[in-house]
Structures are given as C-alpha cells and as structure tokens.
Amino acid sequence: MNKAIAFDEHTRLPAIGQGTWYMGEEAARRREEVAALRAGLDAGLTLIDTAEMYADGGAEEVVGEALRGRRDDAFLVSKLYPWNAGETDAIDACERSLRRLGTDRLDLYLLHWRGNVPLEETVRAMETLQQQGKILRWGVSNFDVDDLQELLEEPGGARCATNQVLYHLASRGIEFDLLPVCQQHQMPVMAYCPLAQAGRLRQALFSNETLVEIAQQKGISVAQLLLAWVIRKEGVMAIPKASSQAHVKENAAALQIRLSDDELARINQAFPPPQHKMALDIV
Ligand code: NDP
C-alpha cells in the first residue's frame, strides 16, 4: 500500500511529492521537465512543490504547463520570498505566481524562510489570501523550533499547515526537537533535499556500504531506500526533485517500501540519530 500522510482533517496525500528547484532554467530541458512532472502525477506523486524563487518564476511556468488541463490532479505548493511577505506585497507576489502557474488557487502557500517582516503581518497576509480564495492553506519553511514557537504564539499562527525543512539521512538534526514539536502540533513536515541534492554528501550516501547492502538485499535503489527512510516517520513527507521520467517512477515506487526494525537499526548505526540540539540545516 502507498504510504500516505494526513495533511489536515480532510486531506490525505501520498507521502512522496515532487520538487522543482532548478527546473525552468534551460529552455532545452523544458519538455523533459514537463513530461517528468506529468509522469509523476500519473504515478501518484500529486504534491508539486515550487517557488517564485526557482528560475525566477521559470519553474512555476514549467509546473503551469504540466498542469494544463489537469489542475485538479495536483496539490500545488508555492513559496514567496521573505521580502514579499508583507501585507500588500504578499498579495502581489501570490497573484504573479498564480499567473505563471495558470491557476486561480494554490493548495498551500509557504513563507520560504523568515526575513524581516513581522510574523504577525505575514499571518495576516496569508489569511487575507485565504479569504480571497487564492490560497487554501499556508505554512512556513526553514523554521527552527524558536521561530516556530514564536509563530504559534501569534494570533492565527497555529493555523500554519506545515513546516518545510531540510531532512535526509545525513542530516537528522530535526529528529531531536523540531520534529517532535511539529508532531505535537499535528503539523506535517515536508522534507526537502531528501536525496541530499548533489555533491559530496550525496555521493557519500549513495556509495555507503550499509545503504548499498540493504538496497541490494531489498532489490531497490539507494535513492528509494533514502526516500523510504525519510517517510518512515508519521507526518513526514518527502519532495524529491526528478527531471527524468525514470527517476520519477522510481521515486513513486518508494511509496510502497517499508523498512524492517533490523534495517532501521543498521541504518542508525551507520548514521546515528542526534543526541543533542543541532541548528536546522538549510541550503
Ligand atoms: P533532492 O534531494 O530532491 O535531489 C535532487 C537530485 O536527485 C537531482 O539531481 C535528481 O536528478 C536526483 N534524483 C531524483 N530522483 C532520483 C533517483 N530516483 N535516483 C537518483 N537520483 C535521483 O534535492 P532538491 O534540492 O531538488 O530538493 C527537493 C525539492 O525540495 C526541491 O526541488 C524544492 O522543490 C524543495 N526545496 C525547498 C527548499 C526550501 O528552502 N524550502 C530548499 C531546497 C529544496 P534528476 O533531476 O536528473 O532526475
């Protein structure tokens, strides 16, 4: 059975979605990116995460093209820059995103990271957008425990629908305190960079002896193992970005992978869980 998470009272979503950072950067790749997103929707990866930041709006245009004629198939998430999070700027930023996405509403709108606009003002802006029907929910991203607690104390702050943060096997800091706080407030966590993006860290994970061995024993790829590991926890979903249909299909199949206690224990030995507070990693 596909792993799902309760996003709110009325909404269950597959625990793996689709990221879009670096999409829309090159015209030559656009067809492949649109096809990958559509293949992802077909395979059940219905949450699509984008942002006004990605390719300066270009990623939202790619998503808009992928959603043409099938908007209702997706749970659409976008994010606004912190400097656009003021009361009037947020309305303008959201309308620009909606235009690029070719839709009249976002399922979820996130503050990309905390900036100088007071949280109270951003919450008011989000609620105005909600009343106007331009967004159905709002949330935050890159909020560590202190920021989140401050938000929860603001009027309406507890209506924050999610916290999108970096989480992968080589960065487990959130397990110490942020994840328990989110769980306590029934706030789903959206794990970004679940495959550790690119570079040395990713290489270290993909060539790690324990992970390679477990993946081989289960007949899955290391990428699938990493995704299955991220979504093993209640209330955590992963949003890997894949720009090829082959990767998308592989990622969707990870929704069905379960890890045994023994496999989890071996993984814990290779990548120990945090024993103390660690500052939230960001990219
Ligand atoms: P990911 O950890 O998702 O890694 C993406 C890389 O993994 C790409 O190179 C992709 O290749 C590759 N990949 C995807 N599937 C597979 C697979 N099955 N096997 C092998 N390689 C695979 O990094 P991202 O930084 O993209 O993070 C995911 C998403 O999270 C972003 O796209 C964005 O939407 C969001 N995000 C949010 C942030 C925030 O501040 N809120 C910050 C960073 C990301 P290919 O493209 O060739 O398929």
Image: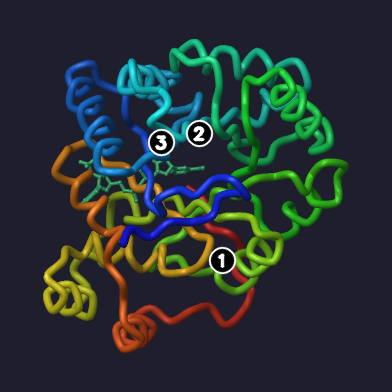
22 left or right of 234? left
The disc, 1 or 2, on the residue closer to the chain's N-terminal end is 2
Q: Nearer the viewer, mark 1 or mark 2?
A: 2
What mark, if any, has residue 77 been given in the picture?
2
The local secondary structure at tag 1 comes to helix
Q: Residue at x 19, y 23 (%)?
A: 29
Report x, y in % for residue 158: 77, 49
Report x, y in % for residue 47: 42, 40
Quarter location, residue 204: bottom left
Residue tagged by mark 3?
Answer: 48
Residue type marked 1: Ile
For label 2, the crowd category at 10 Å Cα-Cα, with few meaning under 14, some 14 to 19 and many 20 or more, is many
Asked if disc 3 and disc 1 are in contact, CB closer than 8 Å, the reply is no
269 left or right of 145? left
The local secondary structure at tag 2 comes to strand
Q: Is residue 106 above or below residue 111?
A: above
How far apart are the two marked residues, 1 and 2, measured between alpha carbons?
22 Å
Asked if disc 2 and disc 3 are in contact, CB closer than 8 Å, the reply is yes
The disc, 2 or 3, on the residue closer to the chain's N-terminal end is 3
For label 3, the crowd category at 10 Å Cα-Cα, with few meaning under 14, some 14 to 19 and many 20 or more, is many
Residue type marked 2: Val
The chosen color scheme is rainbow
Residue tagged by mark 1?
Answer: 174
Q: Nearer the viewer, residue 219 or 96?
A: 219
